[in-house]
Amino acid sequence: MLKKISCDFENFTEVKAMLQEAIAWLGGCDILVHTAANMLVKDPLSLDESDWRRALSVNLLSPYFCIQGAMPALMDSPAGRIILFGSGAGKSGGLGPNLTYGASKGGILAMTFNLARELAKTKVTVNCLVPGPIDGPLMREFGPDVYNKALAKHPMGRFAMASELVPPTLFLASEEAAHITGEALDVNGGYFTD
């Protein structure tokens, strides 16, 4: 039987309560995947405190508090896995005026690398998927000019579909990935290379 639990990712009390309810319902936690994101398309010099607070809360702090809350259960698991979602914007600065998104996703990369090293002794792995542009409503928020320029620049001639992030997520959650930690796995069809 499925159970839906929701929370406001800007409210860390709700985030922690949601996580504890989920762990109690599931009877533990083997894999934590954090995909929630907030992307604001706005002139970088006109951002206000609420813009920064929203992006940092959803994109950087909520994953941290989910990890913090899940660690006891993850350490009890024979195969604890943490999989975060970064973005090519965290490496490149983004495609357009989305400074808060790129900055917070850069923070996800740093969090991945630090926690992978610090948690290695617990046998819980920490990895990050780094998607490029995804075909969907967020890309269209940039408007047709940025969207079409980005699409024309893409080596595969198309953006990824959200479903194409599922197989690499499943791999990082698998037994085969038990010795992979601290990896930022690019899933972008060659859009960003490093």
Image (cartoon, helix red, strand yellow):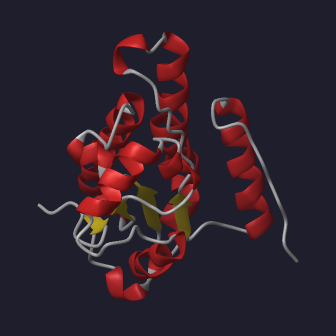
Residue 14 rendering spot, x and y as whole percentages: 73, 36
| Residue lying farthest to the right in this orientation | 1
Q: In the image, residue 160 lies at what x, y percent?
A: 42, 70
User: Can you say whether 68 is above or below 177 in the image?
Assistant: above
Q: Residue furthest left?
A: 194
Query: In this figure, what is the number of numbered marks?
Result: 0
Q: Is residue 182 visible?
A: no
Quarter of the image where one finds residue 106: top left
Q: Quadrant of the C terminus?
A: bottom left
- What is the x, y in percent for residue 144? 45, 47
Give 182 or 94, whichever is nearer the viewer. 94
Q: Closer to the camera, 94 or 84? A: 94
Q: Which residue is drawn at the image coordinates 29% and 44% (left, top)?
A: 90
Residue at image point 39% right, 76% down: 172
Query: Which residue is drawn at the image coordinates 55% and 15% (left, top)?
Result: 50
Residue 18 seen: yes
Please indicate whether residue 76 sits to the left or right of residue 105 in the image: right
Question: Which of these two is toward me, 72 or 180?
Answer: 180
Q: Is residue 43 above or below residue 122?
A: above
Is residue 100 depicted above or below 125 in this figure?
A: above
Near-viewer residue (30 or 109): 109
Is residue 152 left or right of 3 when viewed as pictured?
A: left
Residue 169, image x, y percentages: 45, 74
> Which residue shows up at 46% across the image and 41% down it?
142
Q: Identify the image quadrant of the N terminus.
A: bottom right
